[in-house]
Image (cartoon, coloured by chain):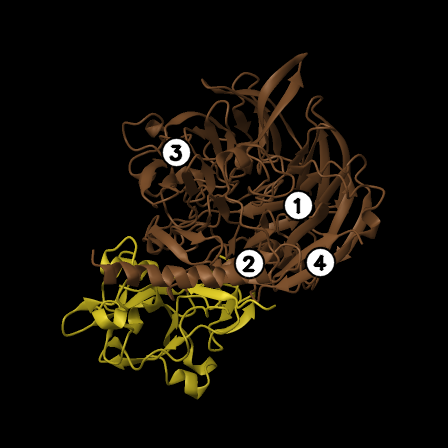
Chain colours: A brown, B yellow
Amino acid sequence: MSATTRLALFLPALTLFSLLSTAVLAQNLPPYMSVTDARLRNQDNDSWLLYRGSYDSHGYSALDQIDTDNVANLKPVWSFSTGLREGHQAPPIVNNGYMYVSTPQNHVLALNAVTGDLLWRYVRYLPDDLQQFHPTNRGVALYGDLAYLATVDAFLVALDALTGEVVWEVAVEDYYNGYYMTMAPLIVEGVVMVGVSGGELGIRGFVAAFDAETGEELWKTYTIPAPGEPGSESWPEDTWKTGGVPVWITGSYDPDLNLTYWGTGNGGPWMGDTRPGDNLYSTSVIALDPKTGALKNHHQYHWNDSWDWDEVSAPLLIDYERKGKTVKGLVHPGRNGYLWFLERSAEQIKFVDANPYVYQDVFTSIDAITGRPEYDMTKKPGTGYEASFCPSLWGGKDWPPAAFDPNSRLLFIPANENVCSTMVGEEIEYSPGRAYMGRGTSDDGGFFVRDGADHIGELQAWNVDTGERAWTTTFESHNWGPILATAGDLVFMGGTNDRKFRAFDSTSGKVLWEYPTNSGVIGVPVTFTADGKQYVAVQSGWGVDAQREQNLINMTRGSDTYVPQGGVVWVFALP
Amino acid sequence: MSATPKTSKALTRRSFLQTGMVTGFVLPSTVLGQPPNRARPKAGDWLVFDGGEKSGERITPALLELDQRPVAALAKEPETETLRDGSRLNRVMVTKLDLARLDNATGDLTADGVIAYSAVCTHTGCDVTNWDPDNLFMACPCHESKFDVYNNAKVVGGPAPRPLALLPLRLDGDAIVIADIFQGRVGFTQQF
């Protein structure tokens, strides 16, 4: 390489550094703190580095400056409009004063976490022929000095965390064939893992891993086994090629077992009779080795799904008491309406117990040993067979994450009660990238509220050691609110159609504080500190299935509830 | 704010596919030229069934029944018989309407009542494949947007901001050909 060439390469980098220094100094920000494996493993209360704050997916912070006594004084300290519509579901990811917020249409905003001033903005120009079943994004991941974004056109993008410049990007799959991504990546020891959406578009789901530094693909593990692989007998003929089973929520990670745990989605088409069999590993939890992608073990919550009950929420890693012993557990409030307690080990995922947390009229029994449910087949829709069932296709809880307070031993579930669906299947032909659901039209619009219901949304608290419900707070509105729990004996959640973001007493469920935001709050709340002061941050921006369910509630009840759209990042603190 | 915000722009999946690169710089599609199967339908193209038992067969009014669920269709360039299936934005849904219920301007854009609307929803780009037979509305399976086929695909429900684009048709003997380019913008509009 000639000296001229070297200089030409060096100058842009020099200019970049100069701009960067100016930007950071002007913002009064500390030097950027690289995100290490140690920081990811040991939750740093000053920052919020992972989708759920910690690898165990507790959605919990030990911060307690804001507590039950003073939360009524909580005030907004800054807000920032994203300029975008649709579902703002991502947690603001915070690293020592630097905040990273992803939005629908795959923008990333880097903000000063204390002032809300913009450091940079990444704008992705999406293809004109893209279709977005779920126009949202659920967050970035941080590692080293980079920020990682999984995009709706199925790319994984690595951004310089200080400048927003693209360091590398790779195509994970072809969006044209129905693959897209909405989840925040999970990073373990330099391995960036992402799953794909497209369970309504005839994909074959997978989790794939990429080198954090180079973007090189390291492994790809399909959620549907190919012929000859274990579990392939549960898929007839060629159904495995287009059987769906997406993975669209960030997994949990157990460093001791060195296993990642992922929830998987529905089989496709939606009607189970189009793919007779259990359809492994649909509607399951799967354990993957983060280094190799090897599928070590699994548990299927329910077989041959016909209800669109994706079980994509990753289980919370909770060690709980049963019969006088401590169980290293996996806990999952299922979309199928049951609260699942499992046991995790290197060898297996073992069923412990499961009980409904909302009204559920499909399961007639659950095998005490295996956890396999039996069905009331009159409640299972099929091709040309219409059936009504509860909970609705959005389940007792959809994707909004539950949270766990290790001190009170309470698990908090954002639930929807009293809503049900009617579905009938129709024959459908596969065509790449086209809707592949096979759902026909039902007379009642496919959705109804149970007779006599006085509410839909619920915030539930369950003691994980007794398996009993501690309290329930109800809302007339449906509830799409992700949950944050804190050591201040508080639970933060939005999720209702009245634009409110609320703080609840975690011991009683009583509302202690609420604030009307610009839109409905379906973003994941987080908390962090800066200069020793605690802040709570969340995005408000209604859209996607919360909006869709509102439309159906309006049709069912003859109401005209309107929830404004448009995203805003909100940050709250005590005066 | 004293610092200048920086905005970076991304490359698209299709750009990558065109150059076969995994990372780095790409040429714009205009430099590479557009394959005929990706070009939008134009006047003189045939209209053929897209999927089903008659897939690839030219559509005639006699093959469709009045006020029935729209069927998927594509344009086909007659000289080279190139099917314009290289872009989702070329997909249309076709149904046969009662000319007496259409205004003259709209009726003139049909082939003896056969009307073609873009299959791509103006909300977030999903295929509008569902059908409300009671009201004769096309419906999007993603977010419940509904479009009145007798009223220029006017939005009658859901979050779609605009009607579906209409693809003018005319008769060529017994069969149907495209009469003009899409009337209206096809697909969703990028925000921001």
* SS under mark 1: strand
**Circle 4 marks a residue in which chain?**
A
Residue A276 is marked as: 3
Q: Which residue is mark 2?
A: A24
Q: Which residue is mark 4?
A: A499
- Label 3 sits on what residue type? Pro
Q: Nearer the viewer, residue B172 or B86?
A: B86
Task: Give the quarter of the image for residue A528.
Answer: top right
Residue at the (58%, 53%) spot, across then down: A99
Q: Specify few, some or many for label 1: CA neighbours under 10 Å numbering under 14, 14-19, or 20 or more.
A: many
Residue A528 is marked as: 1
Q: Split into 4 quadrants, where in the image is the N terminus of chain A?
A: bottom left
Percent coordinates x, y for residue A492 in the rendering: 72, 45
* SS under mark 3: loop
Q: Nearer the viewer, mark 1 or mark 2?
A: 2
- Label 1 sits on what residue type? Phe
Q: Are marks 4 and 1 in contact (CB under 8 Å)?
A: no
Give the distance between the C-alpha atoms of the residues marked 3 and 1, in whole angstroms. 48 Å
Give the distance between the C-alpha atoms of the residues marked 4 and 3, in whole angstroms. 43 Å
Q: Nearer the viewer, mark 4 or mark 1?
A: 1
Q: Nearer the viewer, mark 4 or mark 2?
A: 2
Percent coordinates x, y for residue B168 in the rendering: 34, 80
* Mark positioned earlier in the residue sequence (4 or 1): 4
Q: Specify few, some or many for label 2: CA neighbours under 10 Å numbering under 14, 14-19, or 20 or more.
A: some
Q: Nearer the viewer, mark 3 or mark 1?
A: 1
